[in-house]
Image (cartoon, helix red, strand yellow):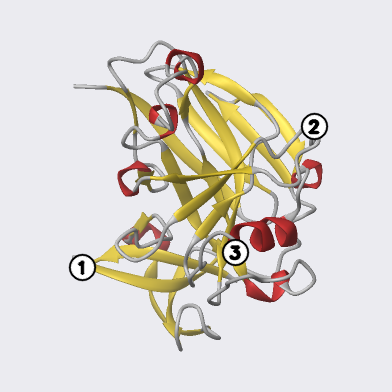
Amino acid sequence: MNIARFLRNDRVQWGIIEGEEVRALQGSVFGSPSPGRVLCSLSEVRLLAPIDTRTNKVVAAAANYGEPDGRDGPGIFLKQPGTVVAHNEPIVYPRICRSVIHEAELGIVIGRSARRVSASDALDYVFGYTCVNDVSASEMTTSDVGRGTSMRVKHFDTFCPIGPWITTGLDGDNLRIQCRVNGETHVDGSTGGMVWGVAELISWMSEVMTLNPGDIIPGGCPGVGEINVGDSVEVELEGIGVLRNPVVADF
């Protein structure tokens, strides 16, 4: 089931996407939603990021592909609310940046309040999955050394496209993940390459903070690549769909 947040008739709504139709969502979004009557066609709505940043957060995993190197879990960082944009909305290339990269990631959507959850129980707290592009200003990973806990590299506005919707009923630990720039494949991997899988990520992060229904955990990326003004960037997750964003110049 594909559950979308969208704008229709100047009103923000949640609904269920079935093919090219948008159906009303019966019940609560993070309860047991079911499809109701047909509202309109998909072309008649503007898809929004499937998260309300006024009430929910994006808690990302750092360095979750490759080797654990003796670590017992990934790094954790938050993407500030202004980073979040939707499918088809632009990524703004900051005027002070020299190198901006894409990071195609699985977004784990939390469905129940989670605090100190064991890995064995953690999948019970998953609502569904979405596509995330954890855009980064790569040169700042070195230029910001010595500036304390600076995360400028991750926090520019528009640096976290999410969408196009939330898909339920998938195995998040076994999905193909791709990133294309202008139709050319830059990354072709699998969420099976995550060092810490979905359950371990939820357990690890819930030891630090309470995860609320609607929070999203990007699980790390299998590879990166440069993006530039004028590019079209696509993140595709098997079973979910394609998150597409143009890259535009800063003002």
Mark 1 = which residue?
9
Q: How many marks?
A: 3
**Residue 85 locus on image (x, y percent):** 36, 45
Secondary structure category for the residue under label 1: loop
Secondary structure category for the residue under label 3: helix
Give the residue displayed 39% in from the left and 23% down from the top.
147
Mark 3 = which residue?
206
Give the residue displayed 62% in from the left and 55% down from the top.
240
Residue 35 visible: yes
* Mark with earlier residue (1, 2): 1
Mark 2 = which residue?
69
3D distance between C-alphas at marks 3 and 1: 38 Å
Of marks 1 and 2, the one in the foreground: 2
Q: Amino acid at mark 1?
A: Asn
Left or right of 149? Residue 180 is: right
Residue 139 to residue 116: above or below = above
Residue 201 to residue 71: above or below = below
* Mark with earlier residue (3, 2): 2
Q: Which mark is residue 251?
A: none
Q: Amino acid at mark 3?
A: Ser
3D distance between C-alphas at marks 3 and 2: 22 Å
Q: If the image is split into quadrants, where does the C terminus sit? A: top left
Residue 129 visible: no
Q: Amino acid at mark 2?
A: Asp
Secondary structure category for the residue under label 2: loop
Of marks 3 and 1, the one in the foreground: 3
